Amino acid sequence: MESRGQFYTLTNNLGMSVEFSEYGALIGRVCVMNKEGMQVPVTLALPDISAYENQNYYLGAMMGRYAGRIPYGEFNLNGKRYDIVKNNGMHTLHGGNGLDRRKWDMDTFSDEDGQGVIFSILSPDGDSGFPGNLRIKVVYKLYNDLNDLEIWIQAVSDQTTQINLAQHSYFNLNGIHSQIDNHYITIASDCHSKVDSELMPLGGWESFEPRMLNDRGCFEYKPIDTIWTEVPFEMDHTLLLNKSMVSHARAWSPISGIQLDVKTTQPTLHIYTGNFLPDGDAYFNSLGISRKSGFCFETMRVPNTKEFADYPSTVLEKGQLFDEKTRFEFRIVDHYNSFL
């Protein structure tokens, strides 16, 4: 592992590199080879930790204790009302005073097929208003002979609590200084969570229009279509995954030839198309970070603190183990051939 200031970098046998930091247990720059054999940065990243401390776009961070929005910053649990720190108008976003702003403990490991880092943190009882002492471990593993990055999240609480942990990297498979509207995207889902005008969950699922689905009934976007400018784009939506599929999401850039496949144990995937990234900001724009310059594939649960019966629960019982894995797999392909 190489060290650069507060960043640590792993590189595998294929030339893929992944940058990490104890600040926010974040993933910084991820680089993979494109179809020309040149190394390409495929995540939006900042040059130093002070830059991460001074931004509000959650670039590369681990979201917690509750990824997504909590309507009006409150929920009821076991007959008791909890008021959570509001940081998004009247609402809570990504846990209030979230774990993306904390320094995590870090360790390293290697095994027969890869190497990685282990981040851990204790979120104390009452942190941002959430009940329970919550212990979280996040393991990032880069495989030696595959361009695969695995994320393993475990957590346990000494009180019943609400939890929704997710990784928030922004991807651009063209490389930086470009938009994402030429990407091809497929997600193993035919519906998304109903939300209101403030993107708050309403309960229930809304089906995609048939023209937005491919022959296997999965959501699909192609840049030659007009979907990008129509509902549900710009996207900031949670999709219920078809778990019978081998892969659960795919994106491909015809410019670089890089394809990203996502496999997860989580029940849903939130796709966000960078709608609120900064336009007109000289600093961020010089780094290739501007509106719709990156997309997020956040594997998670639906933000549903109202406990809608038709959403996967976000309640973690006392002593219960939260245990979820997500794998990002990068490949070179010469054409789009969705199998989702």
Image (tube, rainbow, N blue to C red):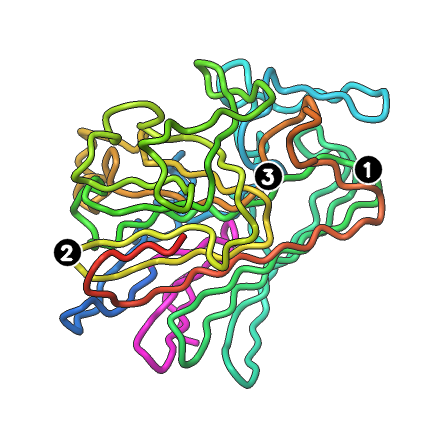
Which one is in front, 75 or 226? 226
What residue is shown at x 47% (from left), y 21% (from top)?
A: 199
Q: Earlier in the sequence, mark 3 or mark 1?
A: 1
Residue type highlighted by circle 2: Ile
Q: Which residues are magenta?
A: 1-29
Q: Residues within 10 Å of mark 1 (few under 14, many from 20)?
A: many
Residue type highlighted by circle 3: Arg
Q: Secondary structure at mark 2?
A: loop
Q: Which residue is mark 2?
A: 255
Residue 187 location in percent, x, y?
41, 45
Q: Residues within 10 Å of mark 3 (few under 14, many from 20)?
A: many
Which one is in front, 191 or 16? 191
Q: Nearer the viewer, mark 1 or mark 2?
A: 2
What residue is shown at x 25% (from left), y 61% (from top)?
A: 258
Residue 240 location in percent, x, y?
53, 38
Q: CA distance from mark 1 to mark 2?
A: 48 Å
> Which mark, residue 294?
none
Residue 144 location in percent, x, y?
43, 80
Q: Secondary structure at mark 1?
A: loop
Q: Is residue 19 magenta?
A: yes
Q: Secondary structure at mark 3?
A: loop
Q: Which residue is mark 1?
A: 160
